[in-house]
Amino acid sequence: MKLQKPKGTQDRLGRDIETYSELISLARSTFEGYNFKEIETPLFESYELFSRATGETSDIVTKEMYDFEDKGGRHIALRPEGTASVVRAYIENKLYAPEIQKPVKLWYHGPMFRYERPQAGRLREFHQIGVECLGAKNPAIDVEVMLMAYDFFEFTGLRHLKFHLNTLGDAASRKAYHQALVDYLTPYENELSEDSKRRLLENPLRILDSKEAQDIAILENAPSVQEYLSQESAAYFTAVREMLEALEIDYELDAKLVRGLDYYNDTVFELMTTIDGKELTLCGGGRYDGLVSYFDGPETPGFGFAIGVERLQLLLEQQEVSLSHDAGLQVYMAVLGERASYEASKLLYALRREGIVADRDYLNRKIVAQYKSAESYGAELIITLGDAEMASKIAKVRVVATRKEVEIPLAELYDNFAEIYMEILEENEG
Ligand code: HAM
């Protein structure tokens, strides 16, 4: 039977998983510097959580949900994103309690699931790094969280970063704009793409997102959300923009940026990079002030973003940025004979407990083959143990780079290896 991984999933190994781990460490150190704490939520939750949070007409719900009935008859979905889960956890764990400092700043990472057509950087199981900041509405939050995303990408070494920024306004602004858009688009209904025809009834704002040429042409003279903002939303957006400008953060106003999820209001953004003259999205997010109360929690504003890790790794590769650094072994132990094998395991255990990265031969091979293994592991030193070394209680220590060898009593290796290691390497430098 030929076993294969499911379509749209990946095995992660080698450099791929090293880079992934490096990105998670970088996210942790960046976000913790902004006082964000880590949260982990379940990989599956009730279907309703995601269908209600992301919107019944969103692509996630209509096409992409991995849902099933469990053995207890519950309608379950593998999580397609993290925001809904964090909001549920915020309510369920009563993080709104007055004794808990606000805003509550949380970050997470892990697999998400969407039934999409797989292509480069688009998978059915993919990974996100995300952040959510709950319990404060202040332009300083929007800007701080955006800056944190910017910092993270800068630390990865990625270049040509630029924000796309828009506002969707509050509920009243959205309602007015929704109507204006329907009024503008209805006369063109028959010329719209099939997807946009459907969206005209279900969710006209999403038409702005269309990549179809016929839609783009029609949208050229469409009304802009800016014209329909309530006074409050307009002032809020101005404050966000002024703060970004004060911090000299480069952004582009993008009236067509609506994002694919229904929970947003006011500020929405995407951070882009450019490769071969093409702008590509690195992360997306925005404000969602109605989501906690929608799930019967107290009125709680929220702001966050999520990064698609596979897409980021692909872009890092394209910009030739390498984050993985397989440091190699410090010590490889070449072993000849059964007696030496016991001693080798004992010494290895002692070295590892001192923090030395070490390994040995387990295949009883000839010495030359063992030396080759040491080289391929990138080992700095080889300690050879055989019958002669067992008899004399003196081991041979070989520097791989220079092929020089020194003899050191076994007892000293046990007692003082860290110092011996440094001395040998220093002597062999240059
Ligand atoms: P999103 O835009 O749906 O937002 O996803 C964020 C990122 O996840 C995307 O920019 C993309 O890089 C990555 N992504 C999405 N689908 C796939 C896929 N099928 N394969 C690979 N990568 C993918 C959210 O998920 C919101 N929860 C963001 C947010 C947090 N807003 C507020 N807080």
Image (spheres, helix red, strand yellow):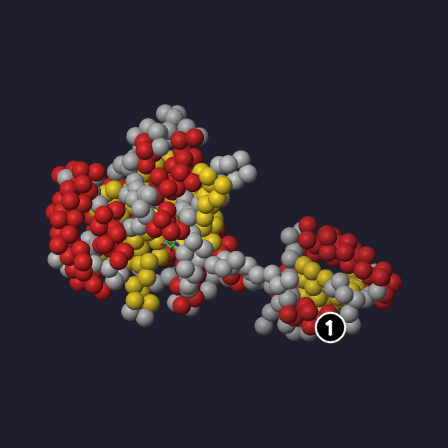
Q: Residue furthest right?
A: 391
In the figure, residue 300 lies in which quadrant? Answer: top left
User: Which of the two residues, 82 or 25, is positioned nearer the viewer here?
Assistant: 82
Q: Residue at x 44, y 58 (%)?
A: 123
Q: Residue furthest front?
A: 190
Q: Is residue 371 left or right of residue 299?
A: right
Q: Is residue 169 left or right of residue 343?
A: left
| Image location of residue 120, percent across then percent down | 42, 64
Q: Is residue 321 left or right of residue 187?
A: right
User: Which of the two residues, 244 or 311, is positioned nearer the viewer here?
Assistant: 311
| Image location of residue 399, percent across then percent down | 67, 69
Q: Considering the numbered disc 1 on the image, is that residue within a helix, a strand or a loop?
A: helix
Q: Is residue 96 above or below residue 161?
A: above
Q: Where does label 1 land, which residue?
A: 369
Q: Is residue 249 above or below residue 85?
A: below
Residue 223 appears anywhere in the view: no
Q: Residue at x 43, y 61 (%)?
A: 118
Q: Residue at x 32, y 70 (%)?
A: 276
Q: Residue at x 71, y 71 (%)?
A: 371
In the figure, residue 342 lies in which quadrant? Answer: bottom right
**Callout 1, which amino acid?**
Ala
Q: Is residue 80 above or below residue 190?
A: above
Q: Is mark 1 within 8 Å of ligand 1?
A: no
| 10 Å crowding of disc 1: few (<14), some (14-19), many (20+) | some
* Rendered-image quadrant of the N terminus: bottom right
In the figure, residue 365 lies in which quadrant? Answer: bottom right
| Image location of residue 158, percent across then percent down | 37, 61
User: Which of the two residues, 150 or 293, is positioned nearer the viewer here?
Assistant: 293
* Rendered-image quadrant of the C terminus: bottom right
| Image location of residue 395, percent across then percent down | 78, 64
